[in-house]
Image (cartoon, rainbow, N blue to C red):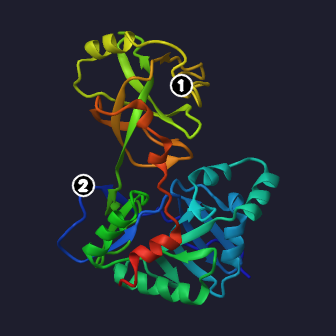
Amino acid sequence: MTAKPHPLADTVPMEAKLVEALPVQGAWQFEPKWDGFRAIASRLGGHVELRSKSGKSLARYFPEIVAALLATRSDDYVLDGELILPMGGILSFDALQARLHPAESRILRLSHETPAQLMLFDCLALGGTGLADRPLAERRAALERFHARDGSAMLLLSPHASDLAGAQAWLAASGGALDGVIAKPLDQPYRPGERAMLKVKQHRTADCVVGGFRRAKDSQSVVSLLLGLYDKAGLLNHVGFTSALGKQDRAALTERLDALIAPPGFTGKAPGGPSRWNDGKESEWLPLKPELVVEVSFDQVTGDRFRHGTGLVRWRPDKAPRQCRMEQLDYALRPSELADISGPRG
């Protein structure tokens, strides 16, 4: 068998532009936006490549996916997809990140204990025929032929919908767990590296206790609010932050927060540790009495905290701090549930 990589193995994935709403005119294909690692998978004879969006090889971190690709009867293809990792039937971004580890023994152990999957949603080449210049409708048909022949528990086929109602149903029925929806033009070729698709991200809100804050070094005014939620044991755990304070009167807000400074702030998991934004130094913060509640918007949750910064929606003086519980983050969508949501669409 050949040991050369596929000529299209280094294809840069086509990307999506963030929009406020899904398109209502034109011919589009809608797909779920999976929360994982984007990957271009290719095989030519006995040579398999698995590359990230940045072009780096992911093969050593996901040996079980490499084995699944080598086990296919087809031996000449390039596929676009998302590496996902279910734990207890729930997708875990933390578990994916744990794979990016220098120790091969650890990677091999995790690949057996918690195997990843490759969710496929595009086909750039199959059986010696390049498809990148073909419209999506033809590429999807080729992908479905590949999956019908070589699909497995490791190589999955992402659901799709050709109607806007189907895509909107995913967002509504997923309870906020779905990361979003991608819209792809049916009549367009694959455009590597371009933002030729559209994406609508799912945004949810949560009511959080302000358990602390950080000051700006220059002015000493508030620069970010530290957010907390109560767990079942009644402990206030740090879950993220918001620095989207907008045009608020920061002087007045700082004065209000200064009057509430009192330890411990967070009684469970607390902020702290070296910060990559602060030259590795301990990140300083001031604890507050748990009296203020703020509603924030967020997109993704990793473990028990917001993965990114949040947006400040409004203050909630009507909400008791003890009502702000961790359950607000408990939206875990299983792939099987998404298949049920999507239904037999085409």
Give the mark nearest the N terminus, 1 or 2: 2
Determine whether, in the image, residue 37 is placed left or right of residue 183. Answer: right
Mark 1 vs mark 2, CA separation in Å: 35 Å
Determine whether, in the image, residue 207 is placed left or right of residue 78. Answer: left
Q: Quick one: SS at disc 1?
A: loop
Q: Quick one: SS at disc 2?
A: loop
Q: Where does residue 268 sit, x and y in percent of width and height? A: 59, 30
Q: Which mark is residue 266?
A: 1
Residue at the image point whose x is 26% and y is 13% from the top: 252
Q: Where does residue 345 sit, x and y in percent of width and height? A: 36, 83
Mark 1, other Cα within 10 Å: few <14 / some 14–19 / many ≥20: many
Q: Which residue is mark 2?
A: 20
Question: Residue 289's quadrant in the figure?
Answer: top left
Callout 1 amino acid: Phe
Q: Nearer the viewer, residue 276 or 239?
A: 239
Mark 2, other Cα within 10 Å: few <14 / some 14–19 / many ≥20: few
Callout 2 amino acid: Glu
Question: Residue 225's quadrant in the figure?
Answer: top left
Is residue 127 among what the camera can see?
no
Residue at the image point whose x is 74% and y is 82% from the top: 1
Determine whether, in the image, residue 305 is placed left or right of residue 70. Answer: left
Residue at the image point whose x is 70% and y is 61% from the top: 114
Report the label total: 2
* Above or below: residue 247 compared with residue 169: above
